[in-house]
Image (cartoon, rainbow, N blue to C red):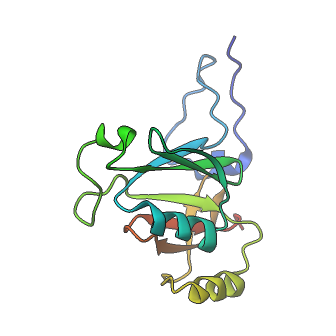
Amino acid sequence: MWHAVVWPAAARAVACWPLPMNPRAIPIRDIDHLVLRVADLEPMLRFYREVLGCPIERRQDDIGLVQLRAGRALIDLVPAQGALGRAGGAAPGREGRNLDHFCLRVEPFDEAAIRAHLRLHGVAAGATARRNGAEGEGPSIYIHDPEGNVIELKGPAA
């Protein structure tokens, strides 16, 4: 049985269209995982583990899947040349990305510490700007992983 979704006040305040209150709506809470098809697994593993601090949760080399823990969610890396990756077509690149960007909620959002950590790893960071997200408007910084995927590092709504 589905239950009605009760939207937090912050979510209702930033909605830009009327949200139907369907009692049969699927009650989505968070992003569970996302899957990135990758051309070169090792640099991607180093980036997500060393720069973003995502530990390996599960690895299935026989099918070509590495799952990294990102807070409550998972980021799956699937080599394009592996069993799972071949099913998705050509490898991702600058002209054919898998997605526009994904956003990781950062808590606490200490801009100076984040920028120092990114510099230590040679990762260029865009300007900090106030952008809207699931919790409302707050600070965020855009970065790129080694294969050009755009990642938004998002602070709390303020």
Q: What residue lies at 61% left-to-right and 66% top-to-bottom?
A: 49
Q: Position of residue 150 (x, y in %)?
A: 43, 66
Depth check: give the residue in front, 64 or 90: 64
The answer to whether residue 1 is above or below residue 130 is: above
Q: Quadrant of residue 60?
A: top right
Q: Quarter of the image containing the N terminus?
A: top right
Q: Residue furthest front?
A: 62
Q: Residue at x 69, y 29 (%)?
A: 5
Q: Residue at x 69, y 38 (%)?
A: 7
Locate residue 57 relative to residue 144 in the image: left or right.
right
Left or right: residue 151 compared with residue 25: left
Task: Locate residue 28, reporting x and y percent.
Answer: 62, 33
Q: Residue at x 55, y 34 (%)?
A: 19
Q: How many marks?
A: 0
Image quadrant for the C terminus?
A: bottom right
Q: Position of residue 14 (x, y in %)?
A: 59, 52
